[in-house]
């Protein structure tokens, strides 16, 4: 398998070198996406990485995994669980890939402890823009290793990753803490993230007066009488609605969730975004309809439908990172400007500067250690008229900058080039690109900016009700992505499946 990998990388490197010699920029095709940015239909000058989709090696003693970039989270977890191991940070959507986690920004409920996904990587193999194949790590080309994290592929093509692993446990003992205000939420985040016994922390804000902070602890031992709750089967509740019931309790409640169910608890319904599909088609939202439509309500299928339908231009999907000191002000703003609930909340450990990951310059009392950030997920319908949609996104970007926050770059980004580089460290970025001969590649702003164009008649027709939604469903079904969820075995890995 390693020989196959080396041959494939040699071909990729040769193709990259040809583009470099012709002074032509190229883009990378992964075969799937978890970005909501509109895709460029032009497929010229493309490097195809879709075949790099294998877990090459699990080292039980060293607790590492050698993984190609196009391996999705469910395949990775299914493989490592057989060895009794798990990545410290697992993206909550099964289709997000290892390469995407490194090139993008992936902060999950364990990131208050471990940092972003790239912080759990030992080294990466990369093809530079000139076709040279290099290894980057903390000890070799460390500036490239850290600089390329979150840089959306603007330094080269990642072709292999060595991940750290940790011991997997059978369950996540999960506690739901009802909250009555955003200030209470922030204080609770500070308290629970300081507890060394806690492995996972996130939260959901259902309104200004109702929310839940969810904490998790890895365990093999069930407390007597503790309920075991699943979320991966078509007959199970969606996680967000289950948590909302806990929000009505007067105090904390605890249950056990099988580890893999916990890791992918937001897959069904895409957190809660799938709820808007029921409203769009005027369907009742109940246990029967969720069961019947379950194939279409997994995140892989939802992304396919979103891009095919054109509704990414009418739906606000933004992840924003704020310092704790301004997070409450930001929620006040979104309440007035969007009125969208629920909001996702996730405390994050910052990366070392300089970085293209979201960051702030607020420090702890020592004046050196960066303070944690709070990821606020704002996902809901926006204006249907194009100019109005752009306007609310631009206002959101300005408010975010005013409050010392930064956004994830997977989403719609409308900053002008000047505005963008006023936020990010262009001097450092350009110097690093020059050092590693990456200037022939599109830079990060060129890759993430959204072109604001006058909608064509075809686009207007495609996005009209119900044509857009039906077309999106049709294209999602034709993609066959639902079969991946049906074939996945991470839900049912047993002791007999383990490799020792």
Image: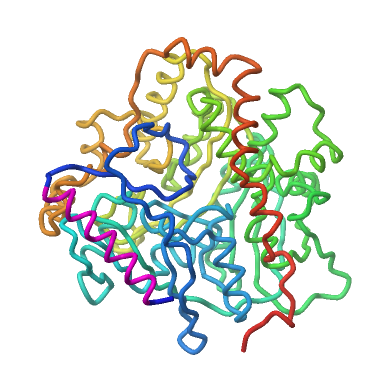
Name the quadrant of the C terminus: bottom right
The residue lying at 17 percent from left, 52 percent from top is 18
Q: Tell me, what colour scheme is on the image?
A: rainbow
The answer to whether one can see residue 361 in this image is: no
Q: Nearer the viewer, residue 352 or 68?
A: 68
> Relative to residue 56, is residue 160 drawn left or right?
left
Q: How far from the left and from the top, in percent, is residue 182? A: 58, 42
Q: Nearer the viewer, residue 177 or 134?
A: 134
> Relative to residue 160, is residue 285 drawn left or right?
right
Q: How far from the left and from the top, in percent, is residue 291? A: 81, 43
Q: Nearer the viewer, residue 146 or 374?
A: 146
Q: Which residues are magenta?
A: 3-21
Task: Name the quadrant containing residue 45.
Answer: top left
Q: How many discs mark residues in the rendered view?
A: 0
Q: How far from the left and from the top, in percent, is residue 491? A: 72, 64
Q: How far from the left and from the top, in percent, is residue 119? A: 39, 66
The residue lying at 65 percent from left, 73 percent from top is 218
**Residue lying farthest top?**
457
The answer to whether one can see residue 261 in this image is: yes
Asked if the stretch drawn in magenta spans residue 42, the answer is no
Magenta-drawn stretch, dominant element (helix, strand or loop): helix
The residue lying at 58 percent from left, 30 percent from top is 380
Name the quadrant of the N terminus: bottom left
Q: Nearer the viewer, residue 29 or 144?
A: 29
Tell me if residue 167 comes above or below residue 125 in the rendering. below
Asked if the stretch drawn in magenta spans residue 15, the answer is yes
Tell me if residue 12 comes above or below residue 385 in the rendering. below
> Relative to residue 219, is residue 145 drawn left or right?
left
**Residue lying farthest right?**
225
């Amino acid at each position: 398998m390693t020989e196959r990998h080396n041959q494939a990388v040699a071909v990729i490197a040769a193709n990259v070198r040809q583009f470099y010699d012709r002074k032509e920029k190229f883009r990378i095709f992964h075969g799937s996406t978890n970005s909501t940015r509109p895709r460029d239909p032009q497929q010229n000058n493309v490097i195809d990485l879709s075949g790099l989709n294998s877990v090459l090696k699990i080292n039980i003693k060293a607790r590492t995994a050698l993984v190609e970039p196009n391996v999705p989270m469910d395949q990775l977890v299914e493989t490592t669980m057989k060895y009794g191991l798990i990545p410290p940070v697992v993206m909550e959507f099964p289709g997000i890939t290892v390469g995407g986690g490194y090139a993008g920004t992936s902060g999950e409920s364990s990131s208050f402890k471990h940092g972003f996904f790239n912080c759990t990587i030992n080294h990466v193999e990369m093809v530079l823009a000139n076709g040279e194949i290099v290894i980057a790590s903390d000890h070799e080309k460390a500036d490239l290793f850290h600089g390329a994290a979150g840089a959306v592929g603007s330094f080269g093509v990642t072709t292999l990753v060595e991940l750290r692993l940790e011991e997997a446990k059978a369950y996540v003992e999960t506690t739901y803490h009802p909250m009555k205000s955003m200030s209470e939420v922030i204080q609770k985040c500070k308290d629970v993230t300081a507890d060394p016994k806690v492995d996972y922390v996130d939260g959901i804000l259902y309104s200004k007066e109702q929310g839940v902070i969810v904490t998790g602890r890895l365990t093999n031992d069930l407390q007597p009488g503790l309920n075991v709750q699943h979320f991966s089967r078509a007959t199970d509740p969606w996680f967000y609605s289950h948590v909302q019931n806990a929000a009505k309790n007067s105090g904390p409640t605890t249950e056990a969730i099988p580890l893999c169910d916990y890791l992918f608890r937001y897959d069904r319904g895409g957190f809660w975004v799938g709820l808007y599909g029921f409203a769009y088609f005027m369907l009742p939202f109940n246990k029967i309809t969720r069961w019947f439509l379950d194939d279409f309500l997994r995140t892989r299928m939802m992304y396919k439908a979103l891009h095919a339908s054109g509704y990414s231009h009418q739906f606000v999907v933004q992840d924003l990172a704020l310092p704790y000191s301004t997070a409450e002000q930001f929620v006040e703003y979104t309440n007035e400007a969007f009125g969208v609930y629920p909001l996702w909340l996730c405390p994050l450990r910052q990366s070392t500067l300089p970085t293209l990951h979201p960051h702030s310059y607020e420090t702890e009392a020592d004046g050196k250690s960066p303070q944690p950030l709070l990821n606020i997920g704002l996902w809901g319908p926006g204006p249907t008229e194009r100019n109005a949609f752009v306007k609310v996104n631009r206002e959101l970007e300005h408010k975010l900058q005013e409050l010392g926050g930064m956004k994830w770059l997977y989403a719609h980004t409308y900053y002008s080039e000047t505005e963008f580089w006023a936020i990010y460290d262009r001097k450092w970025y350009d110097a690093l690109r020059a050092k590693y001969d990456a200037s022939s590649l599109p830079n990060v702003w060129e890759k993430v900016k959204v072109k604001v164009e006058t909608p064509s008649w075809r686009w207007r027709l495609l996005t009209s009700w119900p044509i857009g939604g039906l077309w999106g469903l049709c294209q999602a079904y034709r993609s066959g992505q639902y079969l991946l969820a049906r074939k996945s075995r991470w839900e049912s890995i047993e002791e007999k499946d383990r490799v020792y």
